[in-house]
Amino acid sequence: MNSKVAVVVLAAVAVLVSGCAREVAGSAAVDRPDPNQVAGLAVTTGDSGPRPGVADAGLPVANSDGSAVDRLAANAVADVQAFWQKELPADFGKDFTPVRQLTSYDSTGQPLRLCGSSSAGLVNAFYCQQDDSVSWDRGQLLPQLNDSFGPMAVVAVLAHELGHAVQFRLGSVNQATPTIVKEQQADCYAGAFFRSVAEGQAPHFQLSTGPGLNQIMATLFFIRDTAGASAQSASAHGNAFDRVTAFQLGFADGARRCARIDVAEVRSRITEQQFNPNDQDQGLGKGNLRVNDQSALRDLQTTLKAVFPQGQLVAGQQSCSDAKATSPASYCPGTDKISLDLTNLVRIGTPPQKGAKGGIGDFAAFAEIASRFALAYEHGTGHALDGPSTGQLTACLTGMWAGTITPERQGALQLSPGDLDEAVAEMLAGSSLIAADVNGRSVPSGFARVEAFRDGFTSTGLAICTSKYSG
C-alpha cells in the first residue's frame, strides 16, 4: 500500500475523520448466494487429486522419462481433452481435435528445440500454435507445483494451456489479440473444465469445492504476474485477482462465457497496474508499509471512517462480553471498538522474503482490520453479526472499501500493485477474517469469499452488498 500523508508518530490511534455512508434506495432485487454453495454446487471437503485405482490414460508423450509427474501430466491432458471433445460441439457446434503432440522436457537437462526456442532453463508449460503442441517442464515446474499445492495444481496449469488450443480451434483470437486477453480466456476455459471435475465427470481426477478448489485458485496466485508488471506487456498473464476472476467466470458460467472475454471487457475490469513514484519501500518490498506504524494505522482509519462511520480503533486488546476475540483485529459490539493484536498483525503484514518466512503483505493485514469496521457498520445498521451470511456481507463490504482507495481517488492510503493479490491469498487461507463473522467463523468456501469481495470492489456503493448478501 501507499501512504500519501507524511509520517507522524502517534502515541495512540485516534479517530480522525467521521465519514458519512448511506444506502441507495430503490435498488433492484438480486439473488442472494447461498454461503454453503459454490456456483450452485454444495461445498465439499472430500479428497482432491487423482482417482485411486484408475489406469493411466497412456497418451504418447515425446521425451518422457516415464516418471510419476509425466504420467500425472498425461492423465491431465487426457481428461481436459475428453472434456472439450464433448463441450465444443455442445456449446459451439465445432469438433475438438486433440493436440498433435505432447512433449516432456527437463529444464535442467539436455535441451530440446520446442516451438522455435531452446528448452534450456525454460521453467514453463506452454501451448505452441505453430505445431499444435503442449509441452511441460518435468524437471522443475511440475514438481514444484505438485510439492507446493498438490497434484491438481499440475492439472490446472495444463488445463490453462489447453485453453489456448481451444481458442485457436474456435478462431476467437489471432496474432493481434493482446496477450492478456488470451490468458484471461485460457484461465476461464480452465475454470469451465474444473467445474466438470467438481461434478465428478473427470475419469482420472476428483475435486472438492472447498479446500480442493481453494488450492486450484492458490495455484493462480503462485503463477501470477509479478507485482508492478504491466497488463500491456507482451508476456502479461494478469495478477492473481484478475486470473481468479477469469477462472471463476468459467467455473460459474461455462465455456460460452469465456468466449465472450474480449479486449473491451478485459480493459474494463483488469486491476493489474504498475508502480508509481509514490509507492514506498520500507525494507519490505515496494508497496508494502509497516503495518504497526502509527501513521499508517492513522491513514488506514481515515479511509475506513469515510466509509464506515461506526467503530473506533483502540490501542491494545480489549475485553469483550458479547463476542469472541479474533486476530489480528477484534470487534466488540458492546463497546463498538476494534482492537488489534499487533504481533499477529505484523506477522500477516510482512511479506515473505527470499530465504525467510513471512506472512502475506500489508494489504492482507489492513483488510482484516477493515473487515471489523465493516462489522461495526453492520451492527449499526441492524444486520446480524454471526453466521456465514455475515461473512459474505463482511467480505463484500471490505471489497467495497478497497474500491474507495484506488490510486485515482487520491486518498490518505492507496492500493499498490499486488495489494489485491494479497487479499486473494488471505481469503484462500484455511480461515479468513476478511470473510468472517464477529466470532471469526469464515464463509466455508474460498471461492465464495473472493466472489463476495470482488462484488464489493467493483460496486459503486453499499447497496450491492446489503441487497445481495444480507441474511
Image (cartoon, grey):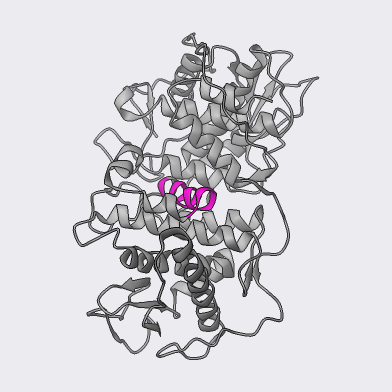
Quadrant of the rendered image containing residue 353: bottom left
Is residue 234 located in the magenta-colored stretch of the structure? no
Residue shown at 61% from the left, 25% from the top = 372
Residue shown at 34% from the left, 72% from the top = 127
Examine the rendering and report whether any part of residue 236 can be seen: no
Image quarter hosting the C terminus: top right
The residue most toward the left is 176
Figure check: 211 above or below 81: above
Figure check: 131 above or below 215: below
Figure check: 428 above or below 169: above
- How many dots with numbers? 0
Image quarter hosting the N terminus: top left
Spot occupied by residue 430 in the image (x, y as percentages of width and height): 66, 48
Quadrant of the rendered image containing residue 53: bottom right
Who is closer to the viewer here, 360 or 139?
A: 139
Who is closer to the viewer here, 88 or 244?
A: 88
User: Magenta-highlighted stretch: main secondary structure?
Assistant: helix
The residue most toward the front is 93
Who is closer to the viewer here, 366 or 298?
A: 366
Residue shown at 34% from the left, 40% from the top = 281
Spot occupied by residue 2 in the image (x, y as percentages of width and height): 36, 32
Examine the rendering and report whether any part of residue 433 can be seen: yes
Spot occupied by residue 207 in the image (x, y as percentages of width and height): 64, 62
Is residue 249 located in the magenta-colored stretch of the structure? yes
Which portion, as a residue range, is magenta? Answer: 242-254
Quadrant of the rendered image containing residue 344: top right
Who is closer to the viewer here, 27 or 218?
A: 27
The residue most toward the right is 321
